[in-house]
Image: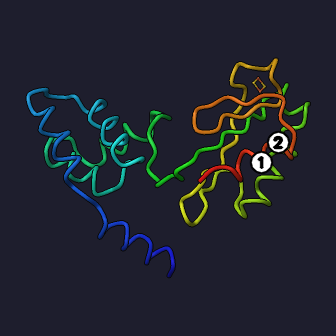
């Protein structure tokens, strides 16, 4: 019921303006579906169904083709994400140095599980596997910023400072 309501609100709130502009700017370029999806995602933070429907209408790609592209590339998101994205690395080096404790601490603090977004869309918590900075283990990337040698108290402080 709550989910249905949120979905309805999201649909009502969909602003076609930014996507109109994006589609206009690509109108001369046939087949530019990936850059259109990228720009749409930049504009909305993810790819809402309404956006995919509009893109389908204007480009001639079927909705199924667009979903195919959007689900194939990990850079695209079909679910609305939080304003802040926390990636905790749980690759081998980070795991050994305490990443699971960081994850548990944040799950308790935020009241969500890894992979979920808080109901107020403030934060998305994700677990990733080796970001190539093992010397900083355990590490996290919060809104694109790298933080190393984390302990639960430090990660809690960082997350509490997010608006
Ligand atoms: S295991 Fe975490 S950065 Fe490599």
Residue 49, given in percent of the width and then of the height, sits at 33, 56
In screen coordinates, is 30 left or right of 124?
left
Crowding at mark 2 (Cα within 10 Å: few <14, some 14-19, many 20+): few
- Classify the position of ligand 1 by quadrant: top left, top right, bottom left or bottom right: top right
Residue 160, given in percent of the width and then of the height, sits at 71, 53
Whether label 2 lies within 8 Å of ligand 1 gets the answer no
In screen coordinates, is 113 left or right of 74?
right
Residue occupying the point 65% across, 50% down:
115
User: What's the image's color scheme?
Assistant: rainbow
Residue occupying the point 78% across, 43% down:
155
Residue 151, given in percent of the width and then of the height, sits at 87, 39
Instruction: Choose top left, top right, bottom left or bottom right for residue 147.
Output: top right
Residue occupying the point 54% across, 59% down:
121
Question: The residue tagged with tag 2: helix, strand or loop?
Answer: helix
Question: The residue tagged with tag 1: helix, strand or loop?
Answer: helix
Whether label 1 lies within 8 Å of ligand 1 gets the answer no
Residue 144: give its label: none
Residue found at the very far bottom of the displayed protein = 1
Residue found at the very far left of the displayed protein = 28
* The one of 155 and 5 positioned closer to us in this rendering: 155
Crowding at mark 1 (Cα within 10 Å: few <14, some 14-19, many 20+): few
Instruction: Choose top left, top right, bottom left or bottom right for residue 148.
Output: top right
Marks 1 and 2: in contact by CB < 8 Å?
yes
Which residue position is annotated with label 2? 154
Cα distance in 3D space between marks 2 and 1: 5 Å
* The one of 138 and 70 positioned closer to us in this rendering: 138
In screen coordinates, is 56 left or right of 92?
left
Residue 157: give its label: 1
Residue 69, given in percent of the width and then of the height, sits at 37, 37
Q: How many marks?
A: 2
**Quadrant position of the C terminus in the picture:** bottom right
Residue occupying the point 54% across, 53% down:
82
């Amino acid at each position: 019921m709550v989910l249905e309501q949120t979905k309805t609100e999201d649909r009502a709130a969909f602003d076609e303006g930014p996507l109109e502009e994006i589609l206009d700017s690509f109108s001369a370029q046939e087949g530019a579906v990936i850059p259109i999806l990228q720009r749409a995602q930049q504009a909305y933070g993810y790819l809402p169904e309404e956006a995919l429907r509009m893109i389908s209408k204007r480009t001639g790609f079927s909705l199924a083709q667009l979903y195919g592209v959007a689900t194939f590339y990990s850079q695209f998101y079909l679910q609305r994400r939080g304003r802040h994205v926390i990636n905790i690395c749980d690759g081998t080096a980070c795991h050994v140095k305490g990443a699971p404790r960081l994850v548990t601490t944040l799950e308790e603090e935020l009241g969500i599980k890894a992979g979920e977004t808080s109901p107020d869309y403030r934060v998305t918590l994700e677990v990733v596997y080796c970001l190539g900075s093992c010397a900083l283990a355990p590490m996290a990337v919060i809104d694109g910023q790298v933080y190393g040698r984390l302990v639960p108290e430090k990660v809690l402080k960082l997350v509490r400072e997010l608006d």
